[in-house]
Image (cartoon, rainbow, N blue to C red):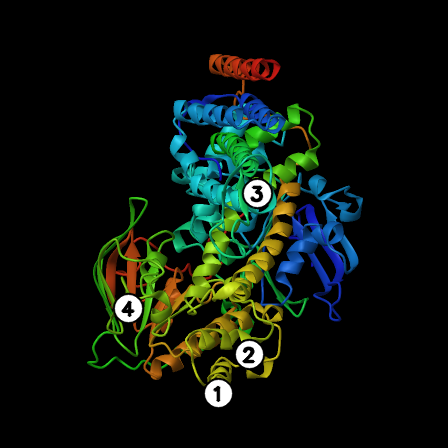
C-alpha cells in the first residue's frame, strides 16, 4: 500500500479533505455494529473509489479481507453462542458427539460486522495513502499541530510497508535459489520462516538507523516547512465535504430512528 | 593534516579516536584531518579500515547518535560538534550520503524525495523549483521523477540519494561510497557536479574503495588502514604514485586467472528469443545467448539495462514471457526452482540477503540439506576451504567482514556443486584485495568446469577477468565477444569512456 502516481479525482483533493474522510469513516465504523449500516458505509467508500477511478487498487485488498472474514467467522462460530441456532458443525445424526458446535446467528452477525468494519476502514485508509504524497500528509499533520514525532512515525510506517515487502521478496528469492523449502506441518512452517524472518529483521534494523539519520539531516525535526506547491482546497473538496456531511447525517438519522 | 594553504577550514578532526561499544579495538586511531572550503579530499583504504566510521565521526553522528568512546576534537565550520544541539542542526551545514542508498530514500516518488528536503529549508518556491530541476538534470534522473524510489535499480537509487543530499546546498558534503553501484557515465556526471560544487566553495569528503573518476577530481588523497591515516598524497604526486592504483594491496591487483578456452562441449546455458516483460514493460527484448562449461562470461551494461532480469531466468526466479531458456538440458521455464537450484547457483549482490544461520557451517549446510544431500560435512568443509573460511566455520555469519560474507555466500552456492554459478555484482563493496580473492575463486571454479556468469557494471572487472563479455543495452545484447585486447575497448565501451585515467590534471583550480 503506497502512493500511486496518477491523475484521479482523489489525487486532486486536498490532503486534509482525504484525512477527514478517512477519520470520518473510521469513526462511523467504530460507532456501530449494525451490519446493514456497516455494509452501506463500506459500499459508500467503494462507490467513492469507483467515482475517483481507484476501484482497481482497492480490489487488491479483497483477498486479504476474504481471508480475514473466514478467520473471523471460524473464530466466532467456535467461541460465541448467541441467538438462533442455524445449524450444527457436527450434525445431530452423528452418534455421541452429534449436535455439538452449533452455528448461531449471533456469531455470524458479529463476524460479518467485524469484517465489514475492517473493510470500510481499510478501504478508506488505502484511498488516503494511494492518492496522497506522504510529504503532503506531513504538511497537513504539521498544520494540525500534530507532534513531530507522531508525524515522523506515520511517515516511516508508510515508507517501510513497500520496502519490507520488497526486501522480503528479495530474501525469499535468495533462499529459493538455495532450494529453500518452506517446510511441512505447523512446526515445519514455523521453522521454515527463520531463513526469511532473520535476514529481514536484521537488514531492517540496519536500515532504520540510516533512515532516522537521514530524516534528522534533512531537517524534518525543524518543524518549519514551506510546501513547494499550493495545497489550497478547491470545489472538489467542498463537494467531498458535502458528501461526507450527507453520509454522517444519514448515519445519525438511522441511529436516532 | 591541514587543508590546502589559503583555504579557510570547513571541517577538522584532531586526534580523533573511536571505539564502538563492546569492541576492544579502536575503529579510528588518532585521526588528524582537515578540509578547506572548496576542497575535495578523497579517502580510500581496504575493507574494514575505518572509512565509514571516519564519515560518521566527521559528520558528528558518532558524537550525537552512537555510544562508544570518542576522543579528540571534531569541528564543523569552526564549532565543535559537541556544541551543536542535534543532528538536525548539523544537517543545516553538512550533507551526508550513506553507503546504503536504499535506506535513505524515504518518500514515494523521486521528485518528492528531493523536494521534501528542500521544503524544510525555508526557501522561496522559485528557488526550490530551480534547485530541484538543476540537481535532477545534473544527476541524470529527470526521467525518473515520477518513479517510486524502491522500484529503482541500485545505481539509480544511489543517484537519487546523491541528488537529495546535494539539493540541500550544505557547505560540507560527506559521501560514503557514492558511486559503488554507478556505471561510468553516471560516475562522470556525479564527479562533474562535485567539481562544480567545490568550485562554489563546498568542502567535499569522499570515501571510496576503488580509485577512479572521483579520485581524479580530488585535491588530496588520504589512505586509511586499521583506523589510522597511513599516507596523504598531494596532487603533484597522485599521477605518479603507483601504489595508489590499488592502495589496499600495495599496488598490485591480483593477476587474472589463466584462461582455459572452452572446448567443444555443448552449451550449459542456451537462450533463444528471450523476452521478459514486467507489467507490460519489456526489460529483456529478445536475446539469444549460449554459455559453455568452463567459461567466465561477464554481463555488463548500464544501470537498468536488463542484466539482472536476464540471469534470474537461469534458475527460474523469473520465467520467460517469450522464448526459451535451457539450463543443463532442463527447460528453465517449467522446471521447479528447487530442482534448478541443483544446476544453477545464484550469489546475490548483497550477501546479507541470505545469511540467517547461527554458524558459518550451518549456513553452508542449509542448501545441501534442501537438496537432500546425504553427505553434509565433507562438502561444507570443501566449500569453506575453497573460499578460505574453514577456520571461521563456528563463527556467526553476520559477524564476518563484508568481504568474508561475500565469500561465504559463494561457499553456500558452490557447496551444492551447480554446473552454472551466477554472481550479481560480485565485487561491489569490496576492496581490491577482496575483489581479487573472489576472482581467484571464480578462476579455480572455471578450471573445474563450472560455467561462471557474472553481472557487473564494472567494465574493467569484466575486461580483466572474463573470457567473454556480453554487453546489454535497453534489454538487448549489443556486444558479445572475447575480451578486448585494446584498452579501453572501442566496441565494448561505445557509450562509455572507460575508467578515467588516474590523474589530477582534470581538476580545475579554484
- Is A110 drawn above or below residue B209 in the view shown? above
Tell me the residue that label 1 is attached to. Answer: B378
SS category of the residue bearing label 1: helix
Looking at the image, which residue is at 49% across and 44% down? Answer: A70
Residue to which mark 3 is pinned: A76
Earlier sequence position, callout 1 versus callout 4: 1
The crowding category of the residue bearing disc 4, from other C-alpha atoms within 10 Å (few below 14, some 14 to 19, many at least 20), is: some
Q: Is residue B326 left or right of residue A207?
A: left
Where is residue B191 drawn, in percent x and y?
48, 50
First in sequence, mark 2 or 4: give its number. 2
Which residue is disc 2 drawn over?
A: B361
Looking at this view, name the residue that lies furthest to the bottom: B378
Mark before the other along the chain sequence, 1 or 2 = 2
Q: CA–CA distance between discs 1 and 3?
A: 54 Å
Q: Residue at x 59, y 83 (%)?
A: B391
- Residue picked out by circle 4: B484
Location of residue A124 in the rendering, given as x and y in whole percent from the top left corner: 52, 29
Amino acid at each position: 500500500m503506497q502512493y500511486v502516481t496518477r491523475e484521479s479525482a482523489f489525487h486532486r483533493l486536498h490532503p486534509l479533505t482525504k484525512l477527514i474522510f478517512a477519520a470520518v469513516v473510521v469513526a462511523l465504523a467504530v460507532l456501530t455494529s449494525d451490519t446493514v449500516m456497516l455494509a452501506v458505509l463500506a459500499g459508500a467508500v467503494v462507490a467513492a473509489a469507483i467515482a475517483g477511478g481507484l476501484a482497481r487498487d482497492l480490489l487488491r485488498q479483497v483477498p486479504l479481507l476474504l481471508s480475514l472474514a473466514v478467520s473471523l467467522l471460524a473464530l466466532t462460530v467456535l467461541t460465541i453462542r448467541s441467538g438462533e441456532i442455524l445449524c450444527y458443525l457436527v450434525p445431530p445424526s452423528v452418534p455421541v458427539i452429534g449436535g455439538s458446535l452449533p452455528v448461531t446467528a449471533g456469531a455470524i452477525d458479529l463476524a460479518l460486522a467485524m469484517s465489514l468494519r475492517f473493510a470500510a476502514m481499510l478501504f478508506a485508509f488505502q484511498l488516503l495513502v494511494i492518492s496522497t504524497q506522504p510529504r503532503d500528509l506531513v504538511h497537513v499533520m504539521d498544520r494540525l499541530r500534530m507532534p513531530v514525532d507522531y508525524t515522523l512515525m506515520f511517515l516511516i510506517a508508510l515508507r517501510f510497508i513497500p520496502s519490507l515487502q520488497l526486501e522480503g521478496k528479495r530474501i525469499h528469492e535468495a533462499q529459493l535459489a538455495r532450494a529453500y523449502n518452506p517446510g511441512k506441518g505447523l512446526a515445519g512452517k514455523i521453522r521454515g520462516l527463520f531463513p526469511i524472518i532473520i535476514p529481514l529483521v536484521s537488514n531492517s534494523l540496519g536500515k532504520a538507523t540510516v533512515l532516522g539519520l537521514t530524516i534528522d539531516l534533512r531537517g524534518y525535526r525543524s518543524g518549519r516547512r514551506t510546501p513547494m506547491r499550493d495545497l489550497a482546497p478547491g470545489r472538489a473538496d467542498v463537494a467531498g465535504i458535502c458528501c461526507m456531511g450527507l453520509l454522517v447525517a444519514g448515519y445519525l438519522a438511522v441511529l436516532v430512528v | 593534516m591541514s587543508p590546502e594553504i589559503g583555504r579557510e577550514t570547513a571541517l577538522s578532526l584532531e586526534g580523533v579516536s573511536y571505539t564502538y561499544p563492546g569492541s576492544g579495538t579502536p575503529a579510528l586511531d588518532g585521526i588528524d584531518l582537515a578540509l578547506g572550503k572548496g576542497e575535495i579530499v578523497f579517502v580510500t583504504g581496504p575493507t574494514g579500515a575505518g572509512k565509514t566510521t571516519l564519515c560518521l565521526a566527521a559528520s558528528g553522528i558518532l558524537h550525537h547518535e552512537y555510544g562508544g568512546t570518542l576522543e579528540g576534537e571534531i569541528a564543523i565550520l569552526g564549532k565543535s560538534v559537541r556544541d551543536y544541539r542535534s543532528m538536525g542542526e548539523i544537517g543545516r551545514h553538512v550533507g551526508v550520503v550513506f553507503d546504503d542508498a536504499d535506506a535513505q530514500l524515504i518518500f514515494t516518488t523521486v521528485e518528492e524525495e528531493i523536494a521534501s528536503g528542500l521544503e524544510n529549508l525555508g526557501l522561496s518556491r522559485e528557488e526550490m523549483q530551480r534547485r530541484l530541476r538543476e540537481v535532477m538534470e545534473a544527476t541524470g534522473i529527470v526521467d525518473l521523477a515520477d518513479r517510486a524510489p524502491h522500484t529503482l535499480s541500485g545505481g539509480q537509487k544511489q543517484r537519487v540519494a546523491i541528488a537529495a543530499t546535494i539539493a540541500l546546498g550544505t557547505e560540507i558534503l560527506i559521501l560514503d561510497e557514492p558511486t559503488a553501484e554507478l556505471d561510468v557515465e553516471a560516475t562522470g556526471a556525479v564527479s562533474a557536479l562535485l567539481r562544480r560544487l567545490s568550485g562554489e566553495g563546498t568542502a567535499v569528503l569522499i570515501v571510496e574503495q576503488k580509485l577512479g573518476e572521483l579520485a581524479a577530481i580530488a585535491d588530496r588523497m588520504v589512505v586509511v588502514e586499521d583506523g589510522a591515516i597511513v599516507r596523504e598524497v598531494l596532487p603533484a604526486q597522485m599521477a605518479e604514485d603507483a601504489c595508489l592504483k590499488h592502495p589496499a594491496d600495495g599496488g598490485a591487483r591480483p593477476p587474472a586467472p589463466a584462461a582455459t578456452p572452452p572446448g567443444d562441449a555443448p552449451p550449459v546455458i542456451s537462450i533463444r528469443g528471450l523476452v521478459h516483460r514486467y507489467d507490460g514493460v519489456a526489460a529483456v527484448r529478445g536475446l539469444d545467448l549460449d554459455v559453455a562449461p568452463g567459461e567466465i562470461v561477464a554481463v555488463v551494461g548500464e544501470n537498468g539495462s536488463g542484466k539482472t532480469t536476464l540471469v534470474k531466468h537461469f534458475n527460474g526466479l523469473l520465467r520467460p514471457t517469450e522464448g526459451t531458456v535451457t539450463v543443463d538440458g532442463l527447460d528453465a521455464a517449467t522446471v521447479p526452482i528447487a530442482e534448478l537450484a541443483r544446476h544453477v547457483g545464484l550469489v546475490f549482490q548483497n550477501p546479507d540477503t541470505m545469511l540467517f544461520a547461527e554458524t558459518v557451517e550451518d549456513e553452508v549446510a542449509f542448501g545441501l540439506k534442501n537438496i537432500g544431500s546425504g553427505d553434509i560435512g565433507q562438502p561444507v568443509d570443501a566449500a569453506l576451504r575453497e573460499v578460505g573460511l574453514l577456520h571461521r566455520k563456528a563463527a556467526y555469519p553476520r559477524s564476518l567482514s563484508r568481504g568474508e560474507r561475500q565469500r561465504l555466500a559463494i561457499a553456500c552456492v558452490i557447496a551444492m556443486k551447480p554446473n552454472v554459478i551466477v554472481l550479481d555484482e560480485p565485487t561491489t563493496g569490496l576492496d581490491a584485495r577482496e575483489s581479487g580473492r573472489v576472482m581467484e575463486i571464480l578462476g579455480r571454479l572455471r578450471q573445474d568446469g563450472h560455467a561462471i556468469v557474472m553481472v557487473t557494471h564494472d567494465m574493467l572487472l569484466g575486461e580483466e577477468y572474463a573470457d567473454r563479455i556480453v554487453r546489454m543495452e535497453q534489454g538487448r545484447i549489443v556486444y558479445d565477444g572475447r575480451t578486448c585486447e585494446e584498452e579501453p575497448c572501442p566496441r565494448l565501451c561505445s557509450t562509455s569512456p572507460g575508467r578515467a585515467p588516474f590523474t589530477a590534471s582534470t581538476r580545475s583550480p579554484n
